[in-house]
Image: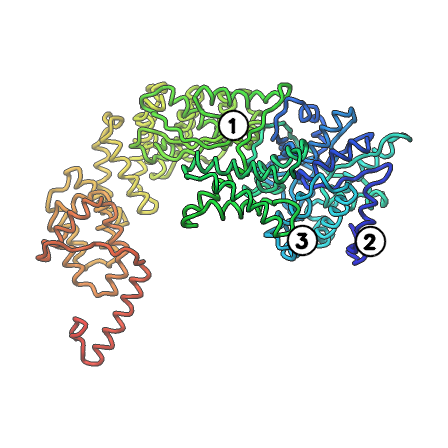
């Protein structure tokens, strides 16, 4: 580690460190990933120094991909997606490249000069083995620059120089005069910058995050290259992050040994995939990114092909202003006159001069655009202008692989199938897709494809609406709606999922088969087994459904929970009812046989009902709904009603007894008036208040129509409520509200009208007070009680409407 001695941070000390980076036999180029200025520096040094070999920071196994990365047909941005696993541990990461990435510039320049090049860092599995915090399955960047972002010294320097953040500081110190600074001067600046960042990190921190061993690995490769270098050969040129670069000469002098890392049992793969500017954008969470990749792409193009008589950044600023104005006009329909556009460009240039900068920075551009383009409310027009700036400066570029790269078969198959279903896979945007599952076979095929990709863990689509046949939600909807978007992580996860098969149907079938096999060895339960059968049909895996059918049969026979079996039979009935969109007719009589056996098992378990009251009541309702459906027409309904009679009379829970009584009432098995008498009996006061309210809740859960058909029920409830004191009423108010929660708004109004008539009123007035929480009501009631008590103590009880 570089010494934190103050001498190192003097001008002379920094120059000494910088001089050690450039020698006859070794040239170390400290860079920031995805920096145009560093890309220009690397380009110039390789052309001037003519190295014998070029070594680049990056997992060493990536070296086999260098011919693809440097292929003239490759269109950036691209990324190497790498994943590895050992047992239950899984790691995934990206290593992105764009035209101005110093690493890619080095590889391209080496290839053009016929100079060998290779990567020299630890592989993904090795890095994650030594890091205290692994990246996990989601995938992050292997070019993380958190040391710069977390540097207190750089933060203070940014404030001192009037920069908004570390990004603005970097652009001021390095990008603003890119291409005009001599290499020795730029390397010295980089050395100072990186030494400040390293001064804020302890040796323990660098060991914990894997930096120490990574640097030892890279130093070993450099040392081996120096040993292989013949007299008269060009220098070994090393391109790596500046944080590591400033210590490389010292590591070589100390002869730090190569680390030995145990990666036994690790399997993995790397593949070149398409990437996007949106993913490169630091504001979107990319740890090594610089903000505004499209802005830096413009700068790079101006730097490698400078405009005559104009500073590259001034030319890039003009292009950006014109593009932002076009974005506002075309996409946001903002009428923007040309004088305002010209004023924005001039103001950006003048701001840079005023702030004593060599040329406009991105912050100058943004300040000028907002000043000249926002004429109205900053909260309205300002939002549109900022959105247009971000869209323009981020860009929508999607990379393209060279012909020789070839996509993995599963990636190519997925792209072809999605294109065949008219789903776009060639841009980075997200799109809405609406599928008519009942009337369109093509839409059902699209649905199965999207569900299958989700089964593989591919994050290409989110279902936003529509019937959920597995969960049993929104079943009244005919259309399924998705938000679909292709992204680099989609290609990455498809690469990883290739272990299941080379086509989407094969991979989905293999993955689902694994799930089935794993579930058969665990205590699955009837409900989860039936969910798997439904999922098989959702995925279009009707050939594998036979295994799931047998699994359901086994689990139903072994299940001891009434609720589980009742839920399972409800799912199976739903599957039969949805045989058109799910094409469950292929299961034939086997499915109806499962429904019958599960129904009989549920009734058997119902004789010794157990479980929480609410799930039990819901299960009883599910069985009632089954009997009134087409699927249940062949079932023996009388067996169910015999069970309901037993539950209504004998169950230990008053809530469940009320639910069973309500079911019998809805079916006409309890006469009109009898229900009111039973409710009155429970409310009469012989039982604890909790139980009497629970019975009413159960009745209204399963027979809410009684609330307006049985006037006597409301009368008895009113009589009981009038007998309660305020404390009792408030304590049981949540249960009472829950009892009426199933009523629709129109039904609530209907009951309110009956209550108003009962009280001799024409209406009750507003039934809710918006903006008041339940806790606030409790507080108000408590205050009212204290005021009433004080008034009573003072002999003024009548003022509060009470008499003592």
When asked about the image quadrant of residue 599, the answer is top left
Q: Residues within 10 Å of mark 1 (few under 14, many from 20)?
A: few
Image x and y of residue 219, in percent: 79, 40
Question: Mark 2 or mark 1, which is nearer to you?
Answer: 2
Left or right of 459? Residue 87 is right
The answer to whether residue 211 shows anywhere in this view is yes
Front-most of 800 and 626? 800
Name the residue rendered at 51%, 26% in the picture: 426
Residue at mark 2: 12
Indicate which disc, 1 or 3, sits on the residue closer to the N terminus: 3
Residue at mark 1: 514
Image x and y of residue 552, in percent: 40, 29
When asked about the image quadrant of residue 778, the answer is bottom left
Front-most of 664 and 440? 440
Instruction: Name the outermost residue toward the bottom.
Output: 794
Indicate which disc, 2 or 3, sits on the residue closer to the N terminus: 2
Image x and y of residue 179, in percent: 71, 38
Badge 3 marks a residue whose secondary structure is helix
Proximity of marks 2 and 3: CB atoms separated by less than 8 Å = no
Label ID, residue 154: 3
Front-most of 328 and 521? 328
Instruction: Name the outermost residue toward the right.
Output: 231
Q: CA distance from mark 2 to mark 3?
A: 20 Å
Question: Mark 2 or mark 3, which is nearer to you?
Answer: 2
Question: Mark 1 or mark 3, which is nearer to you?
Answer: 3
When asked about the image quadrant of residue 81, the answer is top right
Q: CA distance from mark 2 to mark 1?
A: 64 Å
């Amino acid at each position: 580690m570089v010494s934190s001695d103050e001498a190192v941070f003097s001008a002379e000390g920094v120059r000494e460190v910088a001089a050690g980076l450039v020698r006859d036999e070794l040239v170390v180029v400290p860079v920031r990933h995805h920096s145009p200025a560093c890309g220009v520096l690397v380009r110039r040094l390789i052309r001037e120094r003519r190295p014998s070999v070029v070594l680049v920071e990056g997992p060493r196994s990536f070296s086999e991909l260098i011919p693809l990365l440097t292929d003239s047909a490759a269109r950036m941005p691209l990324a190497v997606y790498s994943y590895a696993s050992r047992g239950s541990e899984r790691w995934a990461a990206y290593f992105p490249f764009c035209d101005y990435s110093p690493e890619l510039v080095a590889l391209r320049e080496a290839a053009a000069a016929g100079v060998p090049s290779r990567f020299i860092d630890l592989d993904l599995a090795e890095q994650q083995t030594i890091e205290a915090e692994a990246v996990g399955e989601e995938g992050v960047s292997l070019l993380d620059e958190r040391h710069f972002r977390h540097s207190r010294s750089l933060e203070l320097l940014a404030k001192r120089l009037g920069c908004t953040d570390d990004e603005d500081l970097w652009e001021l110190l390095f990008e603003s005069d890119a291409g005009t600074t001599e290499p020795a001067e730029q390397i010295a600046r980089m050395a100072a910058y990186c030494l400040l960042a390293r001064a804020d990190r302890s040796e323990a921190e660098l060991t914990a995050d894997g930096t120490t061993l990574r640097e030892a690995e890279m130093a070993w490769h450099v040392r081996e290259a120096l040993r292989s270098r013949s007299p008269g050969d060009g220098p070994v040129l090393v391109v790596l992050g500046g944080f590591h670069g400033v210590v490389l000469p010292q590591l070589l002098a100390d002869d730090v040994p190569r680390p030995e890392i145990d990666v036994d049992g690790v399997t993995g793969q790397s593949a070149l995939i398409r990437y996007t500017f949106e993913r490169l954008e630091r504001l979107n969470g990319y740890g090594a990114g610089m903000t505004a990749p499209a802005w830096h792409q413009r700068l790079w193009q101006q730097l490698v092909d400078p405009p005559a008589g104009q500073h590259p950044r001034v030319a890039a600023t003009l292009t950006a202003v014109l593009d932002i104005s076009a974005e506002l006009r075309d996409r946001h329909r903002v009428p923007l006159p040309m004088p305002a556009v010209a004023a924005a460009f001039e103001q950006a240039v003048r701001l840079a001069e005023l702030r004593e900068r060599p040329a406009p920075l991105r912050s100058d551009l943004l300040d000028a655009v907002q000043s000249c383009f926002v004429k109205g409310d900053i909260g309205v027009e300002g939002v549109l202008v900022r959105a247009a700036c971000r869209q323009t400066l981020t860009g929508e570029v999607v990379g393209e692989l060279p012909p020789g790269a070839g996509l993995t078969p599963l990636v190519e198959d997925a792209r072809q199938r999605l294109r065949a279903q008219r789903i776009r896979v060639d841009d980075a945007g997200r799109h809405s897709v609406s599928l008519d599952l009942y009337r369109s076979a093509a839409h059902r095929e699209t649905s199965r494809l999207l569900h299958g990709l989700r089964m593989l863990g591919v994050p290409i689509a989110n279902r936003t609406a529509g019937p959920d046949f597995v969960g049993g939600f929104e079943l009244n909807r005919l259309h399924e709606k998705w938000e679909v978007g292709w992204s680099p992580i989609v290609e990455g996860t498809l690469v990883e999922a290739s272990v299941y098969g080379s086509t989407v149907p094969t991979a989905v079938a293999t993955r689902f088969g694994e799930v089935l096999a794993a579930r058969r060895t665990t205590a699955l339960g009837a409900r989860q087994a039936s969910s798997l059968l439904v999922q098989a049909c959702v995925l279009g895996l009707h050939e594998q459904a036979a295994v799931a059918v047998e699994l359901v049969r086994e689990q139903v026979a072994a299940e001891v929970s009434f609720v589980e079996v009742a839920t399972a039979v409800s799912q199976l009935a739903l599957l039969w009812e949805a045989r058109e969109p799910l094409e469950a007719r292929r299961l034939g009589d086997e499915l109806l046989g499962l429904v019958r056996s599960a129904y009989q098992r549920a009734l058997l378990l119902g004789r010794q009902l157990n479980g929480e009251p609410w799930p039990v009541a819901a299960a009883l309702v599910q069985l009632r709904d089954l009997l009134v459906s087409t699927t249940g027409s062949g079932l023996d309904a009388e067996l169910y009603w015999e069970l309901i009679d037993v539950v209504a009379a004998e169950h230990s829970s008053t809530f469940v007894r009320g639910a069973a009584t309500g079911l019998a009432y809805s079916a006409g098995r309890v006469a009109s008036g009898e229900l009111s008498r039973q409710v009155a009996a429970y409310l009469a006061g012989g039982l604890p208040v909790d139980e009497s309210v629970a019975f009413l809740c159960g009745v209204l859960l399963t027979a809410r129509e009684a609330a307006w058909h049985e006037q006597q029920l409301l009368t008895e409830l009113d009589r009981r409520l009038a007998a309660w004191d305020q404390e009792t009423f408030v304590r049981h108010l949540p249960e009472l509200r829950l009892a009426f929660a199933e009523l629709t708004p129109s039904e609530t109004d209907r009951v309110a009208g009956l209550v108003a008539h009962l009280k001799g009123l024409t209406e009750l007035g507003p039934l809710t007070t918006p903006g008041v929480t339940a806790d606030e009501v409790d507080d108000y009631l408590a205050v009212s009680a204290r005021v009433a008590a004080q008034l009573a103590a003072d002999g003024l009880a009548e003022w509060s409407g009470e008499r003592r």
